[in-house]
Amino acid sequence: MRIFKILNNNAVVVYDGPQEKIVMGKGLAFQKKRNDIVPKHKIEKIFLLRDQSSEKFQQLLATVPEKHIEVAERIISYAEGHLEAPLNDHIHIALTDHLSFAIERLEQGYTIQNKLTNEIKFLYKKEFEVGLWAKEEIEKDLGIDIPMDEVAHIALHVHTAKMDTPSMRETLQTATILRDFVEQVEEITGLSIEETSINYQRLITHLRFALNRMEEGNHFDPIDEDMLELIQVKYKKAYETSKAVSAYLNEEYGIDFPPSEVAYIALHIQRLMN
């Protein structure tokens, strides 16, 4: 393979037959020029990105600081090993672009915020662990202490890059619905829910699976009429709260939980109230 275009010291564009590829490796392009042969022993990654993706990646590699690119690539490699799964090639664009912008904002003294950090931390534990690893790498290499809200952003990028997972928009919507649900419960009951508690985690887990069942069109488990009546009477406040919050989700997101699911959710709310 011969060099067609040098993007930076660590990345070049080559043509392998009719295919355009981006080849990366530490120092791969140092003191090289167009038409020089790419040293095979320095090749670490080869990307076959098509159309606009290739152009966008080339722009990033040519304009983003190399240290930002290097740390982003290490995070991606670690993520694939930690998750034991390949990630979509687009993460090399999305995460690098996001990370570089976040680092620049932090260097300029801006605050990074993420209202869904707690939901992301719980829903995507393995990905959040990747974010924590990234936090250490960025501090070690760049001397920048990224906040937990940025750890959550990284985790979200990693999660949506996994094969056969929902898009970033769908993933964010799920986390937002769960956040809204908890806030509505707190407002109605006057509770301040501890997000590290086991009962909070049980509620979030139940809701996530309930949302998945609705998206996939699966039926909900029925509830015995006597059990339903018992919950309505014995746990009246929890049941009324569940009804009110379920009505809110229906109005805001078009989510229509059946009576059995409203009752099961009431049991989780009751645990929180206890």
Image (cartoon, grey):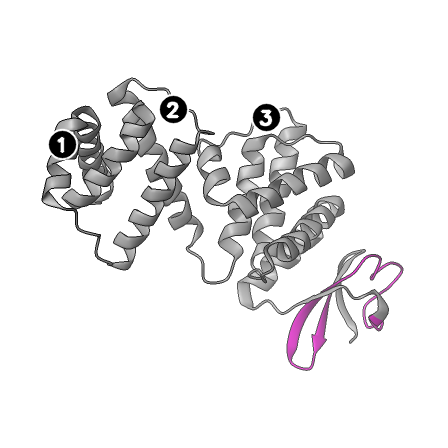
Q: In x, y percent, where is residue 55?
A: 60, 61
Visible residue check, residue 246: yes
What residue is shown with label 3? 110
What residue is shown with label 2? 193
Q: Which mark is residue 232?
A: 1
Q: Nearer the viewer, mark 2 or mark 3?
A: 2
Identify residue type, mark 2: Ile
Q: Residues within 10 Å of mark 2 (few under 14, many from 20)?
A: some
- Figure quadrant of the C terminus: top left
User: Which of the pair 25/208 is nearer the observer?
Assistant: 208
Q: Residues within 10 Å of mark 3 (few under 14, many from 20)?
A: few
- Of the two numbered discs 3 and 1 on the same chain, state the one appearing first in sequence: 3
* Dot 3 and dot 1 residues touching (CB under 8 Å): no
Question: Is disc 2 placed on a helix, strand or loop?
Answer: loop
Q: Could you say which quadrant of the image residue 213 lies in?
A: bottom left
Identify residue type, mark 3: Tyr
- Of the two numbered discs 2 and 1 on the same chain, state the one appearing first in sequence: 2
Q: In x, y percent, where is residue 231?
A: 17, 33
Give me the C-alpha separation between circle 3 and circle 1.
Answer: 49 Å
- Residue range of the region highlighted in magenta in the rendering: 13-40
Question: Is disc 3 placed on a helix, strand or loop?
Answer: loop
Q: How many marks?
A: 3
Q: Nearer the viewer, mark 2 or mark 1?
A: 1
User: Which of the pair 259/57 is nearer the observer?
Assistant: 259
Question: In this rendering, is residue 8 above or below 64?
Answer: below
Give me the C-alpha separation between circle 2 and circle 3.
Answer: 29 Å
